[in-house]
Every structure is written in structure tokens, then in C-alpha cells.
Image (cartoon, helix red, strand yellow):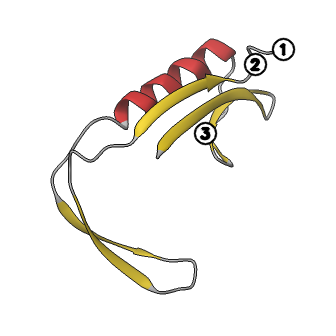
Amino acid sequence: MAVVYHVDQHDGGFAYRVDDVWSETFPDHDTALEAAQDAARRQQIGGDEVEISYQLADGHWQSQHVKGGDRPETDVVDDTADR
């Protein structure tokens, strides 16, 4: 599964989003694009193998062993480029 960061106009400036979740607003396009690229790069940094727990939408808790090197593919899409 790829994590795609979309850069676009948002809240009087520019921001990036993953799905429907927006970052903070940046004053200009280039700053938002650079921030999205940095976030995508940081997704590639591995970590330690750990056990994680998280709550599912139905309220139940799920536990899972996560490998530190198991990182998603990332991409940055500039949605302003088509305008």
C-alpha cells in the first residue's frame, strides 16, 4: 500500500494531505511541496521491531508485531500542476 501526499491550495495557503487529513497550512506552494517531500522521506526511515496496539473502528483493540524495516511506498503528487 502506498502513502500518497497531495499538495494543493488549502485554508488560504498551501498544504499537503494524505487521504482526507491535511497538514498545517504553509504560506506558499514551494514550502508545502518541500514539507510533503520531507514527510514522504521520513516515512522510509525504519525503526525497531515492536508490538503495537490500536483501537479499531468497532471499539475493539488489535495487537500486532511490526517489523521496523517494513515501510510503505510513498509518493508526492502536486495537485496544483494541472491548473
Q: Do the CB atoms of the residues marked 2 and 3 lie less than 8 Å apart?
A: no
> CA separation, marks 1 and 3?
21 Å
Residue occupying image coordinates x 57% and y 84%: 58
User: Which image quadrant for residue 69?
Assistant: top left
Of residue 30 and residue 49, the one placed in the foreground of this image is: 49
x and y percentages locating residue 61 in the rendered image? 41, 83
Q: Is residue 46 left or right of residue 28?
A: left
Residue occupying image coordinates x 20% and y 50%: 68
- Tell me the residue that label 1 is attached to: 83
* Residue furthest to the left: 48
x and y percentages locating residue 53 in the rendered image? 33, 74
Q: Do the CB atoms of the residues marked 1 and 3 lie less than 8 Å apart?
A: no
- Tell me the residue that label 2 is attached to: 80
Q: Do the CB atoms of the residues marked 1 and 2 lie less than 8 Å apart?
A: yes
In the image, what residue type sits under mark 2? Thr
Q: Is residue 31 above or below residue 19?
A: above
* Residue furthest to the front: 1
- Tell me the residue that label 3 is attached to: 23
In the image, what residue type sits under mark 3? Ser
Q: Is residue 54 above or below residue 34?
A: below
